[in-house]
Amino acid sequence: MRKKSSSTFVLIALLASLSCVAKAQTAEQALAFERQGNLGEAAELWIAVTQRNPQDAGAFAHLGFVLAKEQKYQEAASSYRKALALNPSLSGLELNLGLAEFKQGNYRAAVPAFKSALTADPSSTQASILLGMSYYGDKEYALAAEDLEPVSKAEPGNLELHEILAECCLWLKNAACGKEHFEQIMKQDPNSAAAHILMGEAYDGLGQSSNAIAEFEAAKKVSPNEPRVHFGLGYVYWKSREYDEAKREFESELSADSSNALALTYLGDIALKGDHADAALSLLGRATKINQDIRIAYLDLGSIYLRKERYKDAQAAFHRAVTLDPSQSDAHYQLGRLYQMLGNTAAADQEFDIVQKLYQKSDDKVAKNMSLRMH
């Protein structure tokens, strides 16, 4: 075998040296662009750096930062994960990853990142708030309250935190806890429309409809265009079976937000209760195109289809209502009626048996509410 000449070794060393210099210059240029706010140019150069050296954790971290600044959160999260895989000890990386997932609405994916960030820095208020908000976004209200409550006590003037905690309390069916937070908000901002709305929800949860209506009316007076105010008021009227008032409020909500699927649903329900099946069908059809997770919309659609002898459509609608909440008796009852009409006695008996078992578990209030929804 021939030995390589010394000139060859010199050439290889020179090329390696030039490569290192080129990498350093590219990284320096990328940093310069990054500091100047030239994000597109910075991203291109950081990509070049990572292609030349796929083990450069810092380059991937910088690339993630630039992509996040460009609001390319999915790509940013991917870059942050590569950086973490190469060097888990890079400072601030877990927090940045969590933010990239959070801003995509990937709340569950954000939780582990914020947990790690909080473990690295237990005093980080930002990490605590973001972890709590991620739980809130993922509808884990008890966990959200657990993380946000200490922060709200440390920052009593943070009205947004009190609002979020109040909503968590309501979702946890702890109306008294929600009312406590609303009162704190009202002390600091007596004219807060959002606080009146949340207080209205709290009173509704406590079964105090007249107080709930008063709070929603106060919110409407302070800010007539406040999101949710007309829907909230309409819903309380609907529950109180004051359908004309409810219809007026739901229509006001739709005039501000024509894509409010819940407002469309309850307008459809009111139309159905008023024996306007075709109008109800149109409203409920629009609602389910926007949101396929509103149980009462499918319950009402099933009832309309049943009246129109569209049995296959009725069965599909009732099954969807059961899927969305199998613990509610009304959809099982309607399925039982449908199977009776179709002559399927065994299936009907099975549904009625489920109704009986659920009825025994429910209290009088639930049973009464159920009976109101049967058409």
Image (spheres, rainbow, N blue to C red):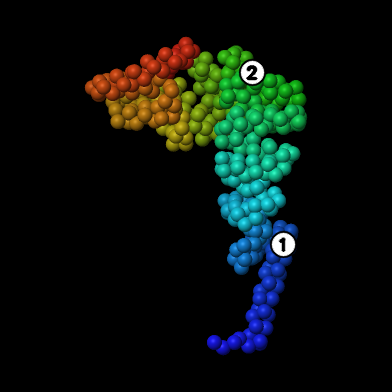
Left or right placement of residue 125 versus residue 229 in this view = right
Q: Which residue is drawn at 54% across and 87% down?
A: 1
Q: Residue at the spot x=64%, y=65% of the render?
A: 49
Q: Is residue 40 visible?
A: no
What's the amino acid at mark 1? Leu
Crowd class of label 1 (few under 14; some 14 to 19; many from 20; radius 10 Å): some
- Say whether marks 1 and 2 touch (CB < 8 Å): no
How many labels were placed on the picture? 2
Please tell me whether mark 2 sits on a helix, a strand or a loop: helix
Q: In which quarter of the image is the C terminus?
A: top left
Residue lying at the far front of the rendered structure: 1
Q: In this view, does 100 lie above or below 47?
A: above
Q: Name the residue under label 2.
A: 176
Residue 60 quadrant: bottom right
Q: Earlier in the sequence, mark 1 or mark 2?
A: 1
Residue that mark 1 sits on: 31
Q: Residue at x 64, y 35 (%)?
A: 132
- The answer to whether 52 appears left or right of 375 in the picture is right
Helix or strand or loop: what does disc 1 sit on?
Answer: helix
Expressed as whole percent of the image width and height from the top left, the position of residue 357 reads: 39, 17
Using the image as rendered, state which of residue 142 and residue 155 is in the foreground: 142
**Residue 119 numbered mark, or none:** none
Which residue sits furthest top?
364
Q: Distance between the residues labelled 1 and 2?
A: 53 Å
Q: Which residue is drawn at 44% across and 15% down?
A: 361
Instruction: Give the residue type that dot 2 points to.
Output: Ala
| Residue 309 appears left or right of 105 | left
Crowd around label 2: few <14 · some 14–19 · many ≥20 (10 Å): some
Q: Let me know if residue 360 appears in the view.
A: yes
